[in-house]
Image: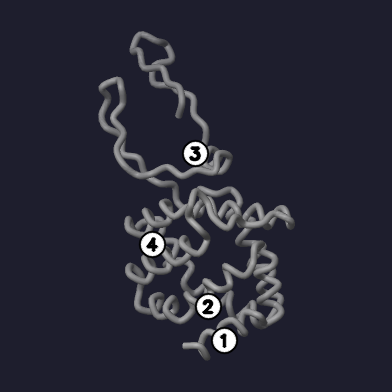
């Protein structure tokens, strides 16, 4: 919100001008930290909260649809999709409602990387940035893996412990969403997991 009529004598008192916050975050590629805001007009303190992950990024819906469509075309993809879908609701709930997870998601630029992945789907030549404001893709992924493991269910923790490091190698190896999906379809996902388990 960037304009409002605050004078009781105005016929428009109580009305204001605003823009949907999801559009602002996406256009400026920013996040808004949680906290308290005290206005200059002596009004009550306003608590600032984060927008839910499912609505804060306009690209998210297209990204999810694209990934689901590609994964469903191969045996490896369907197996991975089944794992993701089994834990998707829990992860979203933690990001949206667990403060430790929410703070990590925003401080490590999760929304910005999500938007970058969405752009990668729209523009095939667009590469997901190696880092955003000094935070690398790997740092964001590992920070989220750690906090989700700490705050999530035993089942989610076990899954993260098994696949976090192989997925980290996966994230480092490819720069676009379609490259990642190509690797799954060509069974390179299994190669990464098998190599990790042999090394471990």
185 on left or right of 115? right
Q: Nearer the viewer, residue 94 or 106?
A: 106
The tag earlier along the polypeptide, 4 or 1, is 4
Q: Could you tell which of marks 4 and 2 lies nearer the N-terminus?
A: 4
> Do labels 4 and 3 touch, CB within 8 Å?
no
- Is residue 67 shown above or below 113? below
Front residue of this view, candidates 184 and 73: 184
Residue underneath mark 2:
166
| In this picture, residue 82 sits left or right of residue 2 | right
Which residue corresponds to the image point at 59% horizontal and 81% vertical from the top-left? 192
Binning the other alpha carbons within 10 Å of mark 1 as few (below 14), some (14 to 19) or many (20 upward) gives: few
Q: Earlier in the sequence, mark 2 or mark 3?
A: 3
- The residue indicated by pointer 4 is 94
In the rendering, at what x and y percent does residue 65 appear? Answer: 64, 62
Q: How many marks?
A: 4
The residues bearing labels 4 and 1 have C-alpha atoms spaced at a distance of: 31 Å
Name the residue carrying label 1. Answer: 195
Q: CA distance from mark 4 to mark 2?
A: 23 Å
- Residue 161 placement (x, y as % from top left): 42, 79
Alpha carbons under labels 1 and 2: distance apart? 8 Å
Q: Which secondary structure, mark 3? A: helix
Q: Secondary structure at mark 1?
A: helix
| Circle 4 Cα neighbour tier, 10 Å, few/some/many (<14 / 14–19 / ≥20) | some
């Amino acid at each position: 919100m960037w304009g409002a009529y605050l004078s009781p004598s105005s016929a428009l008192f109580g009305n204001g001008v605003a823009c949907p916050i999801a559009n602002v975050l996406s256009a400026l590629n920013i996040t808004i930290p949680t906290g308290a805001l005290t206005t200059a007009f002596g009004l009550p303190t306003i608590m600032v909260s984060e927008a839910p992950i499912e609505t804060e990024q306009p690209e998210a819906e297209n990204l999810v649809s694209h990934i689901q469509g590609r994964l469903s075309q191969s045996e490896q993809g369907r197996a991975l999709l089944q794992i993701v879908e089994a834990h998707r609701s829990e992860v979203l709930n933690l990001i949206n409602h667990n403060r430790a997870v929410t703070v990590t998601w925003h401080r490590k630029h999760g929304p910005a990387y999500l938007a970058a992945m969405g752009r990668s789907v729209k523009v095939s030549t667009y590469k997901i940035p190696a880092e955003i404001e000094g935070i690398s893709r790997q740092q964001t992924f590992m920070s989220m893996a750690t906090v989700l493991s700490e705050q999530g269910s035993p089942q989610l923790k076990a899954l993260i412990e098994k696949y976090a490091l192989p997925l980290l190698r996966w994230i480092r190896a490819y720069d676009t969403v379609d490259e990642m999906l190509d690797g799954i379809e060509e069974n390179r996902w299994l190669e990464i997991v098998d190599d990790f388990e042999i090394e471990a």
